Image (spheres, grey):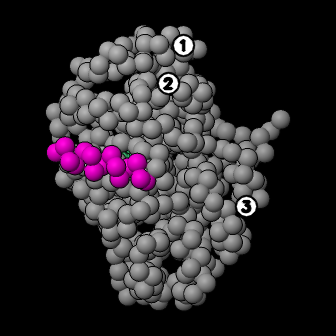
Amino acid sequence: MTHPISPVPEKPTPAMPETFQGLGIADNIMASLERMKFTKPSPIQHRCIPEGIEGKDLIGIAQTGTGKTLAFGIPMIQRLARYKGHGLVLLPTRELALQVDESFQRIGGPIGLRTAVLIGGEPIGKQKRQLFRNPHILIATPGRLIDHLEQGSVKLETVKILVLDEADRMLDMGFAPQINKILLKVPKERQTMLFSATMPVDIVKIATHHMKLPVRIEVAPQGTAATDVEQEIMIVGRDQKKSLLETLLKQYLGTILIFSRTKYGAKKICHGLAASGHKAAEIHSNRSLAQRKEALEGFKRGKYRILVATDIAARGIDVSNIEVVINFDLPDNTDDYVHRIGRTGRAGKKGRAISFATPQETDEIRRIERLIRKPLKVTRPTGLPATTPFARVEEDRPYGHSSASRGSSQGHRAPWKPSGNRGHSSSSSSSGGGWNRKPRSSKKW
Ligand code: AMP
């Protein structure tokens, strides 16, 4: 039976090209790629860019870190430059919005691309001024876009290309009503590109109702964790997590991203680390947008070696050189495991993910193993008293692969390297009408 959202059969995957040549990318965008020193397309880029440039509707099933931003960004920027009209990228979090904007500016800034980022937690007046400059592309979280629609500061009648990024996460966060409202406001005649790490039934419904014969492009089987990430589970009593964390922080000397299940937990971990002399920052929904930006920028630039995050705040964190992701708590939602570990081992780099699990969490581990379709390595933590209950738990474990890798986490010491200093994004400006006015063409476009 044909998949309901894949009436157009997938083309056989041609061999991965070594360059961006031959994908239909315009010369001025090729020049930006060259400046960014991106020489080889990632698999999702290789598959999506030619289809996107042809104006087809796409469903990309890809996790973060696969290069999906440019997989939709290049076609969007190129088509809008050629055919006019506006672009709208809807995504779940402010952090992801800022990072998508940064990528778009790096590619499109040199050819005159103007963007506006419409996210909560920022003064709406500043965003209205950005809109007045007639940006080509809006990058928005659903809630704030609805605020602008209600206040009349934006109209979506000229949207020619719509991207729904991290669509599964938007639905998980309860944005379905806002997305439906927005979908009613954008013209039916448009190109739609939907990206999601997983493909739950609600996403299939959106695709069936709001997309035209979308081409489905999946670069890794659904739920597959980044292949370049070495993963292990450490079984640990709740009250021993802190000392295990301290041990690991001595063992791994690079950048570390720690996940906590709750915002209170994140705050507690971060304060504990700071008190013991670590350079750590926290990112969760109890922090203001300014504090979150400062934490993320500080982490990117090497001011903080450690970032402690909750799942929602961490969406879209794009920092290269994260040496280890530590799951201080297992995620409530099993899918988040894949998103979390996708933060390390990005863009072809090797990574490592270490998850703390209590002796009671065997079911959770089994669910993760089912999702990633492979058994996880269970490691006995080093540097903790031998009286801890791990041995008993390991023997009890139903997976039958528990002791294979004891102590394997040692010997992976990397010198502390601050991550690269990235260009700061900004929505460039020029004179122009505004999103609630008739669009004007701009010089370079
Ligand atoms: P994304 O999955 O879009 O968040 O991208 C993950 C990271 O890979 C980002 O830091 C991108 O800048 C980087 N990246 C994307 N495409 C390429 C490429 N073709 N070559 C090297 N790095 C890339």
Visible in this render: residue 347? no
Mark drawn on residue 445: none
Toward the viewer: 416 or 244?
A: 244
The CA span between labels 3 and 1 is: 49 Å
Quarter that holds the N terminus: top right
Q: Nearer the viewer, mark 3 or mark 2?
A: 2
Please report the bounds of the magenta region as a residue range: 263-277
The CA span between labels 1 and 2 is: 9 Å
Identify the residue position indicated by label 1 in the image: 396
Residue 368: where, in percent of width, then height?
56, 30
Residue 207: where, in percent of width, then height?
71, 54
In this picture, residue 334 sits left or right of residue 41:
right
Toward the viewer: 275 or 24?
A: 275
* Label 1 residue near ligand 1, CB within 8 Å: no
Q: Nearer the viewer, mark 3 or mark 1?
A: 1
Identify the residue position indicated by label 3 in the image: 210
Residues marked 3 and 1 touching at CB (< 8 Å)? no
Q: Amino acid at mark 3?
A: His
| Disc on the earlier residue, 3 or 1 | 3
